[in-house]
Image (cartoon, rainbow, N blue to C red):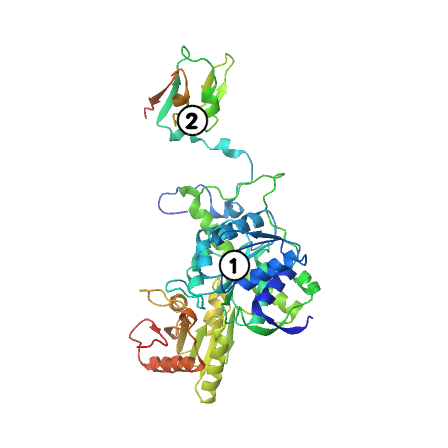
């Protein structure tokens, strides 16, 4: 096992990408993701990483180059944030439909306007339906581990879908944390060389991305959706194998102090660490509060999620993105829909918090849990409410 | 099987991986000729066999016959009229397709 040393999370991610022996990186710098691709460019320039580093003029070109690269059978990585992710938008849908397993780290950041370089989940929630595998990391070690996992799953011949690892901008990307990078031998054991089912090869021509006339489009989409749902088993199995090789265990849904809980907070990403402290405090005060964290967002871990919230009275979903005029935040509406058919389901209340880098403190989480207790008896007036807004 | 009109070409289970076309050079199987609303008609009296129609046709539907005339293959001709437009002798006329 490698040594546990303090590293900036972005740098550690770049080192992990190097250990994954990527062939091609095409990326455009954007805050707060820049350190990842900057460090990768250094590794390539110094000859420490034998890869092509394609400098492009925009994120639209970056992702386009990535798709072309992975289509030839090259292991490919990119990373972006916020406006950069939005600029990739139209190409993002093409990758899973063509079964091109690019791996991307998104350092989550708010979308303009007002201009904000700070963290929330607005960027990735606008890309909810692109059909990529999506995970959310809580801390630096997990961010790094999810990168190995992303390549392992995405390139699996039973999967062949692109994958995004979400890390909170600044609060994760720029944090210096003790991180254990594994030995190269372990990574090689976990991640076999990329052998795609098909690739662009002049010796064996094929067409990727032809027109889908109305007589075929629906069937093509059904085939894509079924294949994506089937990826779930491989995602889980790859975490089992991860545990065997690296010793750390990951599941699609994490629970914390959920035994006998009446109220639970549900969150994705790094805020869960703060929420854990709030749960500890409330437990000490005799309140039966627990925490649920979704690590896997797409494909949605429906059964594991329903199992995790069984027996709860109120589930307080914390969204870090606003969906103006909707019936809740993206996670809130998803979770309500997931539970609608479940007998004895908990009441789902939805809070929007931590937009554009606004701190969400232990006290904020305590307040949300307290409100959830109030809503145990009385229905909330609105389908969602924003936390920490100054009147 | 859908209850409504079944217009699908194949079952979703038969869709090739990634909806790829795995066999090269299969565009000949795509009969584009039924898109046509005008057909090119050649007047051999005026034709000088220059081959402009053959060169400019975007679907490569023209082939030369034994006498040297360029003859359109209506299985693929979409009726775009480029051949008629480029013909230096005005030997090709676009005629409305009667349905």
In the image shown, does A263 or A47 lie closer to the viewer? A47
> Looking at the image, is A377 positioned above or below residue B87?
below
> Looking at the image, is A52 positioned above or below residue A16?
above
User: Mark 2 touching mark 1, by CB under 8 A?
Assistant: no
Q: From the top left corner, tell me how far across and down residue A168 is, in percent.
A: 49, 68
Residue at 39% across / 43% down in the picture? B6
- Asked if residue A34 can be seen in this view, the reply is yes
Pointer 2 chain: B
In the image shown, does A60 or A158 lie closer to the viewer? A60
Query: Which quarter shows the C terminus of chain A?
Result: bottom left
Residue at 63% across / 51% down in the picture? A195
Residue at 30% across / 73% down in the picture? A382
Cα separation between marks 2 and 1: 49 Å
Q: From the top left corner, tell me how far across and down residue A255 is, in percent.
A: 50, 75
Q: Is residue A7 left or right of residue B39?
A: right
- Asked if residue B72 can be seen in this view, the reply is no
User: Residue tagged by mark 2?
Assistant: B77
Q: From the top left corner, tell me how far across and down residue A367 is, in percent.
A: 39, 82
Q: From the top left corner, tell me how far across and down residue A143 is, in percent.
A: 56, 68
Are the residues under badges 2 and 1 in a single subunit?
A: no
Q: Nearer the viewer, mark 2 or mark 1?
A: 1
In the image shown, does A327 or A67 lie closer to the viewer? A67
Pointer 1 chain: A
User: Residue tagged by mark 1?
Assistant: A29
Q: Residue furthest bottom?
A: A285
> Looking at the image, is A359 positioned above or below residue A52?
below
For the residue carrying disc 1, how many other residues have a C-alpha within 10 Å: few (<14), some (14-19), or many (20+)? Answer: many
In the image shown, does A390 or B18 lie closer to the viewer? A390
Q: Secondary structure at mark 1?
A: loop
For the residue carrying disc 2, how many other residues have a C-alpha within 10 Å: few (<14), some (14-19), or many (20+)? Answer: many
């Amino acid at each position: 096992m490698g040594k546990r040393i303090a590293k900036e999370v972005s740098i550690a991610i770049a080192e992990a990408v190097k250990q994954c022996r990527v062939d091609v990186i095409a990326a455009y710098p954007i805050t707060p993701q820049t350190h990842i691709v900057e460090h990768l460019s250094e590794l390539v320039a110094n000859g420490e990483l034998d890869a092509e580093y394609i400098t492009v003029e925009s994120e639209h070109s970056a992702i386009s180059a990535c798709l072309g690269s992975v289509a030839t059978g090259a292991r490919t990585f990119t990373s972006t944030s916020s406006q950069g992710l939005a600029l990739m938008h139209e190409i993002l849908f093409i990758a899973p439909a063509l079964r091109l397993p690019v791996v991307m780290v998104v350092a989550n950041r708010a979308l303009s306007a007002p201009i904000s370089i700070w963290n929330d989940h607005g960027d990735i929630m606008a890309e909810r339906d692109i059909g990529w595998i999506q995970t959310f990391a809580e801390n630096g070690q997990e961010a790094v581990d999810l990168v190995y996992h992303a390549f392992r799953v995405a390139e699996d011949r039973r999967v062949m879908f692109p994958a995004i690892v979400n890390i909170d901008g600044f609060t994760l990307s720029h944090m210096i944390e003790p991180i254990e990078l594994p030995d190269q031998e372990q990574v090689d054991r976990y991640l076999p060389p990329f052998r795609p089912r098909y690739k662009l090869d002049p010796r064996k021509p094929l067409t990727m991305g032809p027109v889908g006339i109305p007589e075929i489009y629906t069937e093509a989409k059904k085939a894509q959706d079924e294949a994506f749902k089937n990826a779930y088993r491989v995602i889980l199995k790859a975490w089992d194998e991860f545990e065997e090789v690296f010793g750390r265990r990951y599941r699609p849904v994490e629970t914390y102090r959920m035994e006998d809980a009446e109220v639970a907070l549900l969150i994705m990403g790094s805020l869960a660490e703060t929420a854990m402290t709030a749960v500890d405090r409330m437990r000490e005060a005799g309140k039966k509060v627990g925490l649920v964290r979704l690590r896997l967002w797409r494909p949605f871990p429906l059964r594991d999620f329903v199992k995790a919230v069984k027996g709860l009275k109120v589930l307080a979903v914390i969204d870090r993105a606003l969906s103006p005029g909707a019936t809740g935040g993206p996670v809130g509406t998803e979770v309500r829909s997931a539970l609608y058919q479940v007998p004895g389901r908990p009441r789902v209340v939805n809070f929007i918090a931590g937009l554009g880098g606004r701190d969400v403190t232990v006290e904020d989480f305590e307040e949300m849990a307290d409100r959830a207790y109030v809503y145990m008896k009385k229905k909330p007036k609105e389908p969602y409410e924003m936390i920490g807004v100054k009147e | 099987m859908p209850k409504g009109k079944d217009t699908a070409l194949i079952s979703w289970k038969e869709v090739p991986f990634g909806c790829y076309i795995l066999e090269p050079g299969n565009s000949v199987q795509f009969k584009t000729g039924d898109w046509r609303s005008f057909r090119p008609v050649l007047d051999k009296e005026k034709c000088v066999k220059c081959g402009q129609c053959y060169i400019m046709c975007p679907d490569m539907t023209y082939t030369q016959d034994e006498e040297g005339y360029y003859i359109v293959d209506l299985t693929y001709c979409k009726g775009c009229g480029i051949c008629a437009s480029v013909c230096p002798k005005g030997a090709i006329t676009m005629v409305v397709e009667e349905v």
